Amino acid sequence: MNPVSSNYQNVSPRELEILRLLAKGMQSKEIASILFLSKHTIDTHRRNLLRKTNTKNTLELVLSSTKAGIV
């Protein structure tokens, strides 16, 4: 396992679902509507993803997950 993909071991199934939607270019408000959650909840999941994967922003998160073969 490469170091990039090891960053994704602690990511929950819901966070992975949100990550895949982020990778499609969707905004938090759109994701919230699709998943029947609040925008605040999506933003919390996004912050948790950034923390867990040690990335600085959503672009870096999506690029890192693509490189790891997650999305």
Image (spheres, rainbow, N blue to C red):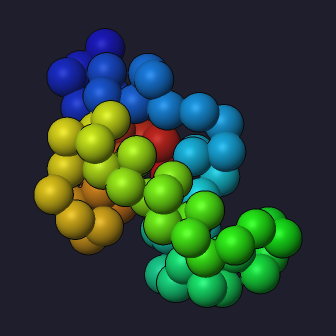
Q: Is residue 67 visible?
A: no
Q: Is residue 42 visible?
A: yes
Q: Nearer the viewer, residue 28 or 67?
A: 28
Furthest toward the right, the residue is 36
The reply, left or right, for residue 22 in relation to residue 1 is right
| x then y, percent, for residue 51 | 28, 42
Identify the residue shown where x is 49% and y is 32%.
11
| x then y, percent, for residue 22 | 50, 69
The correct choice, above or below, for 25 with respect to 57 in the image is below
| x then y, percent, for residue 42 | 57, 65
Q: Nearer the viewer, residue 52 or 19?
A: 52
Identify the residue shown where x is 19% and y is 50%.
55
Label total for image: 0
Quarter of the image where one finds residue 28:
bottom right
Identify the residue shown where x is 40% and y is 47%.
49
Q: Nearer the viewer, residue 52 or 24?
A: 52
Identify the residue shown where x is 66% and y is 36%.
13
The reply, left or right, for residue 29 in relation to residue 7 is right
Quarter of the image for the N terminus: give it: top left
The correct choice, above or below, for 63 with respect to 22 in the image is above
Quarter of the image where one finds residue 34:
bottom right
